[in-house]
Image: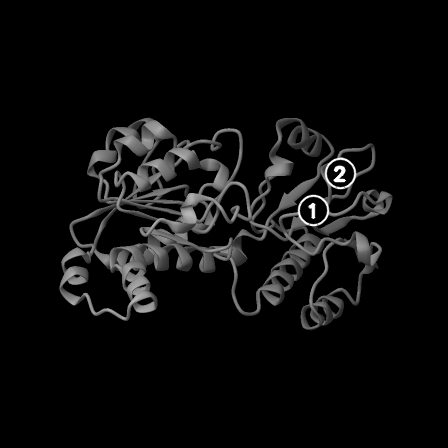
Amino acid sequence: MARVYLGSRFPPEASARLDAGLADHDVVRPRPEDASASNLVAGAVDPRIAEADVVFGQPPPIALTGARAPKWVHLTSAGYTRYANADVAEALRARGVRVTTSSTVFAEPCATHALALLLALSRQLPSASERQHSDHAWPSAALRARSWIWPGRTIMVLGFGGIGRRLVELLRPLGARIVVVRDRPRGDEGVATMDKTRAEEMLSEVDAVVSTLPENASTRGFVDVTWLAAMRPHAFFVNVGRGVTVDQDALTDALAAGRLGGAGLDVTEPEPLPPEHPLWTLPNVIITPHAAGGQIGEPLALVDHFLANLVRFVRGEALVDQVI
């Protein structure tokens, strides 16, 4: 039996499944107003966190780095930026705290969403939608002439975590050449892989860049003005990672000036994107409101992923999606 601190709120069906799965464990809950309702926001500081063996939610890092600490923290997010800070990560390792994410839950919807954005741009769906709602026009010849298919073209995927790996699988049937960019290529990726320096050298050959990058010290501003200037004028940029990994002003300028073919953005900086921001009105841009990770039944999937990992924890087995 483990002592489990539940720091996140879930809708009734997911809460009932969580309660059933924790029937044999000692469960500790924060006050309702202190529980996190978003996987992007840390929960409140609660001294009882340090008394638990397991924490499920988004605990504040300060609650995990004291003299007493849980043995395992399972996050309701794929990202773990606030725990990846060097000082925090070192303190967690020193105390033997393991951290896992819910990356497995979000890999499929995020990869599917990235593919949808890429296909929508290449098949001119934004232009068709705009004409549908503005003047009910039928610009068949113009849209047909600008629509792409992918055999013989090149797609560059930034990042090779759970989302990046699944995205590569979804992209393969398109017939495009696929290249992956990651910090330290290992050689076992099963797809052409390179670091940022080599990637910058081949941007003039790339027809689309799809970013799945998380936020950390090495990825902030990864796609900068130099990177954008090296891309082909017809190329598309899609981002389902984090907004801070891109120089948004430089991206906006490139799109407005026609130096890029279009963009599909599920993430921006800041979020929500201010109503007056020019990205909203550019005709070659699709914006979705950080919805790529969503799916019907998302809370149930998060609960099931945690409960499966809890079984592994109790048995002393390796945990899925461990990052620290």
Give the mark, 2 or 1, whose residue is nearer the N terminus: 2
Give the SS element for disc 2.
Answer: loop
Outermost residue on the front side: it is 135
Q: What amino acid is labelled 2 in the image?
A: Leu
Kindly check if marks 2 and 1 are in contact, taking CB atoms under 8 A apart as contact.
Answer: yes
| Residue 186 in sight in this render | no
Query: Which mark, by number, is residue 184?
Result: none
The structure residue drawn at horizontal position 81% and vertical position 46%, both measured from the top left corner, is 49
Q: Which residue is disc 1 drawn over?
A: 73
The structure residue drawn at horizontal position 42% and vertical position 50%, both measured from the top left corner, is 280
Give x and y (percent) for residue 60.
73, 41
Q: Is residue 286 left or right of residue 78?
A: left
Q: Choose between 245 and 233: the one closer to the eye.
A: 233
Query: Which mark, by number, is residue 64?
Result: 2
Q: Choose between 177 and 144: the one closer to the eye.
A: 144
Q: Is residue 41 above or below residue 93?
A: below
Q: Is residue 209 left or right of residue 271?
A: left
Please state, as top left, top right, bottom left or bottom right, where the C terminus lies in the image: top right
Please state, as top left, top right, bottom left or bottom right, where the N terminus lies in the image: bottom right
